[in-house]
Image (cartoon, coloured by chain):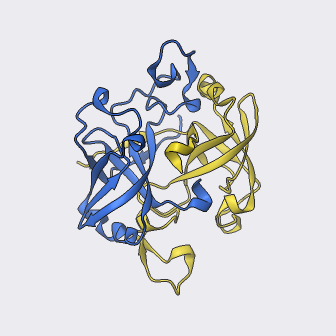
Chain colours: A blue, B yellow
Amino acid sequence: MKERYVIVPIGYVRSSVRDKGEAPRQGRDEEFEAVLEILEEYAAAIEGIRGWDVLQVICWMHLASRDILQVHPQGDPTRPLTGVFGTRSPARPNPLAGYTVELVNLEGLKLTVRGIDAVDGTPVVDIKPHISRLDD
Amino acid sequence: MKERYVIVPIGYVRSSVRDKGEAPRQGRDEEFEAVLEILEEYAAAIEGIRGWDVLQVICWMHLASRDILQVHPQGDPTRPLTGVFGTRSPARPNPLAGYTVELVNLEGLKLTVRGIDAVDGTPVVDIKPHISRLDD
């Protein structure tokens, strides 16, 4: 029996993007703004982000295929099939997406951030401060 | 009933770090080298990383506590309790750790990388190319 782990939402993305086709291909280029609505039970954990300007946010790409191992990069059929670990495709065994975002506002359980193009309703599973020394 | 998602290992970290206490506090400072042993079933997905020098690796911190919402940053009791989303502590609701690593070698299913201080046996759950425009 293969090992498996259980991951839980800590909140959800609220954005104007309604479906996958509509999303700009990479949110950061577009300076796309979204709100992360954090669940009440994580209120004590979210307080810690005050004072940080740039965050790492990990989302669970709930609409992505998980059984595809190779894709045409950026959906371009003229590019050769490439193993998903060499691409940023949402299709991957564990559909985790990491975003480097700017924290615009924090009010109660709502974080307004710049740099996430995820579809409205996408689960958020982790938030950390971005530390250049470690992440760049 | 709360939503939950299932995450699977795509491989495991092989390193000389045997327990949490022994790990340098942040691998990247130490230029720590480790091997990622990818599971056979993901061979087709791993081929795609050839040609990339810098990768994003996400691990599942299987030894971390998941029910702690506030910690003393860097384990220093003189620093005030801080919500875990404002820290890089492994203790968090979903113990995911993201590493920016240098790909040193790829041979079959073994990736040698520089910049991961995870304990030997830590599950790897995702690998992507690091793209400065998006990640820095």
Name the residue at the bottom extreme.
Answer: B78
Q: Is residue A48 left or right of residue A16?
A: right
- Which residue lies at the image location 29% right of the left edge and 63% below the top edge? A105
Q: Residue furthest top?
A: A78
Could you tell me residue A34's position as x and y percent? Answer: 28, 49
Please identify the quarter of the rendering in which residue A25 is found: top left
Furthest-front residue in this view: A30
B121 is higher (above) or lower (below) than A39:
above
Q: Position of residue A91 (x, y in %)?
A: 45, 28
Query: Image check: B55 left or right of A94?
Result: right
Tell me which residue sits at (65%, 34%) in the image.
B38
Report the front residue among B81 and B56: B56
Q: Total label count? A: 0
Residue at the (65%, 42%) spot, across then down: B54
Q: Position of residue B73 (x, y in %)?
A: 51, 75
Left of A115 or right of it: where is B95?
A: right
- Judge whether A115 appears above or below A45 on screen: above
In which quarter of the view is residue A53 placed? bottom left
